[in-house]
Amino acid sequence: VSPTGRVYAIAEQVYEGIIEFNKQGDYNRYLGQNDVVANPLKELLRDYLTDEQLASFALTLPPLFTSISTDSKGFIYATSYPDTESGSVTSQNMVKAINTSGKDCMKRNGYVTPNGDAVYISSSPNANAILGPSYLVDVTINKAGNFTVVDEVRGRLFTYDSDGNLLYIAGEQPGGTKQGTSSSLSSSIIKPVAIDYLYRSYIDKNGQEVNEEIIIVADQQSKSLMYYETTEFGRLVNQATAAYTAGVDTAEKAEAVRAIWEEVRQRNTNYELAYLGIGKCLLVESDYVATKDEQLELYQEAMANFKLAHSGTYYSKAFGRYRDQVLKDNFSWIMTGAVVLVLAYTGYIVYKTVKKRQAKKIRVEGGNK
């Protein structure tokens, strides 16, 4: 149910998209239909088969949605299975953020796209090997705009921020439907059917109130509910992403968020998002420093962090600011040098032209004599 009271639903064998109902329960429309990927073999045979033979082919249908959920802004987050109609299994855009117009507005700015496992094997001689991409069966969104999806094939949870950056992966291995059929209780997710964020508060041993965010998973195979607590590392990542999403519009806020990312970096120096977060905060801080030298120093520091984060987009932004400031500070010298070079080059051309004409005149006069 959206914040405006509209009801959204998905149904088996309904390929037109998500069904929308109004507040009174009346059908409104379909929206957010998955794209159909053409099968090259079918398209090739279409020119050589009769209408009867073509009619015997199965219809090329889009992937079905497996779950939907809405966030506080009214966006519909939807998951779907990989596409198997194109002749090979493809796992593009298995998570979507659909607006009220039915358009996919999911940001996919991360190093990998929000599709679960980014790397997987398609074939193996090992009979126990898990093949193919993730099969995402549910999605849930927290208060900060981060979302988590669950994979039924390998039994793992993938959490992303609102820009599509992969924050962390949870879930013990081996898990998933391919790892066994035991119905006994297990710490592994075997056959997940639903996930959700749950918030709870308690008083710790120091008498301080602690607000905790956990992920709860309903597992059909073990007929149990499992919940996953956030580790200290995960809490720091969540705190930093939530603070930045809420708005970092002052130097004090930027410094506070950067301090959290610094702590994340100390715990894991290979965590690229920490460098990305530090660089973003440095760009905000550069707008509030007193001198131009401090500003240039922050730009350089931001570029160094964006380079470690492998973010070409934000590196270009920081470099653009650094370049513009250097050009602005040295504009008079640069223009003076440019004018001197132009005048010198023009004088050189005039000198060469005059010399050439004089040499030609001398040759002509010498020939006449």
Image (tube, rainbow, N blue to C red):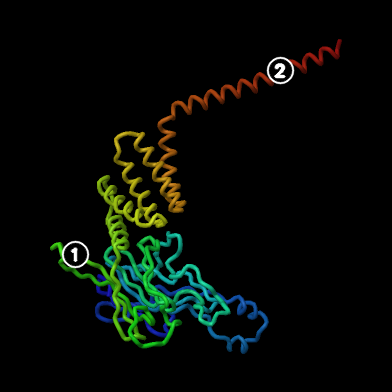
22 sits left or right of 48 in the view: left
Marking on residue 210: 1
Counting other residues with Cα less than 10 Å from the Cα at mark 2, is it few (<14), some (14-19), or many (20 or more)? few
Quote the CA–CA distance across marks 2 and 1.
87 Å
Question: Which quadrant holds residue 354?
Answer: top right
Q: Residues within 10 Å of mark 1 (few under 14, many from 20)?
A: few
Secondary structure found at label 2: helix
Image point (44%, 43%), residue name: 319
Residue drawn at x 25%, y 71% as measured from the top left: 4
Residue 208 placement: quadrant:
bottom left
| Element on which disc 1 rests | strand
Horizontal and vertical percent for residue 113?
45, 65
Residue 232 is drawn in which quadrant?
Answer: bottom left
- The relative height of residue 272 versus residue 85 in the rendered view (above or below) is above
Q: Residue at x 62, y 89 (%)?
A: 52
Q: How many marks?
A: 2
For the residues carrying marks 2 and 1, which lies nearer the camera in this image? 1
Residue at which label 2 appears: 355
Residue 264: x and y in percent read: 33, 56
Quarter the C terminus occupies: top right
Which residue is depicted at the point 32% across and 59% down? 237
Amino acid type assigned to the residue bearing label 2 in the image: Lys
Let me know if residue 267 appears in the view: yes
Most extreme residue toward the top is 369
Left or right relative to 282: residue 24: left
> Label 1 sits on what residue type?
Val
Q: Is residue 149 visible?
A: no
Image quarter (top left, top right, bottom left or bottom right) of the N terminus: bottom left
Tell me residue 59's x, y (percent).
Answer: 53, 83
Q: Nearer the viewer, residue 180 or 13?
A: 180
In the image, which disc is placed on residue 123?
none
Judge from the rendering whether residue 84 lies leftward or rightward of residue 144; answer left or right: right
